[in-house]
Amino acid sequence: MIKISVIFLIVVLLSACSIAPKSNSAIAIYDFGIQYVQPSTVIKNLPHAKTKSLLVTDIESAPGFDNHAIYYRLAYNNPTRSYTYASSRWAATPAILLSQQLRNKIVTKTSDLVIKDSSTAKSDYALHIELEEFTQVFDAIDSSHAVISMRASLVERQSHALLAQQSFSIKQNAATADAPGAVNALTTASDLLMNAIIDWLGHALQATNQSL
């Protein structure tokens, strides 16, 4: 009788394991979606077009953003503390997603030759970007917005001279006070911020060429 009871218990446990959901099955994975970029004649016709190559280095992120978590802050409660959504995360780190987005936009919107890795080819200039903030901020329980802050630096490769530097920051209201709202707001904000960086980059390169 004891042997039969033990066998029955094992069968029940195995059955429970087979029907129990996996711990990560409920986690939602997000990225920036399919990016549709329209070519820009304003940047494309700058004097530096088709003559210079640009190394777009991987974006560096501040401590805390070098993972896949989606962060939010409660400004109405404790704005100095950050939280993460337990059941939602990015498909890659924000820095990786933003780096790919930036390179795609530069290639589409300009005539510059974009280089990803300094070991593959020589380049005239290098664009370095630091990600300082990439967060959803709650002003109230049911009201939030996305905040992205970056610092961009344009460097001449041969002389290592810093040619231009600019800080960028943007806010975008979130439609919903949850993880999907954070993702949508951060995606929209990143698209707008990348456009601003590319506009700045074009004018910085133009000013550099005119000074030569």
Image (cartoon, rainbow, N blue to C red):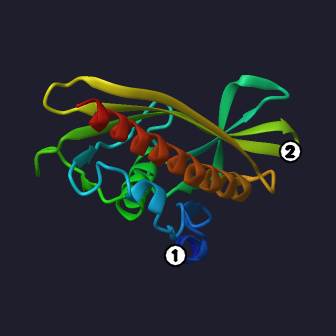
Please say if 104 is above or below 75.
Answer: below
Q: Earlier in the sequence, mark 1 or mark 2?
A: 1
Q: Which mark is residue 7?
A: 1
Compared to 78, does 92 lie above or below?
Answer: below
Report the residue at 54% width, 76% height from top: 18
| Amino acid type shown at disc 2 | Ser
Asked if residue 183 lies left or right of residue 78, the reply is left
Whether residue 126 is visible: yes
Q: Is residue 63 visible?
A: no
Q: Neighbour class for label 2 at 10 Å: few (<14), some, many (≥20)? A: some
Disc 1 and disc 2 in contact, CB within 8 angstroms: no
The quadrant in which the C terminus is found is: top left
Residue depicted at x 86% and y 44%:
143
- Residue drawn at x 74%, y 25% is 79
Position of residue 112 measured from the top left corner of the image (x, y, whole percent): 28, 55
Image quadrant containing the N terminus: bottom right
Pinpoint residue 127: horizontal percent, then vertical percent.
Answer: 32, 39
Quarter of the image for residue 88 reads: bottom right
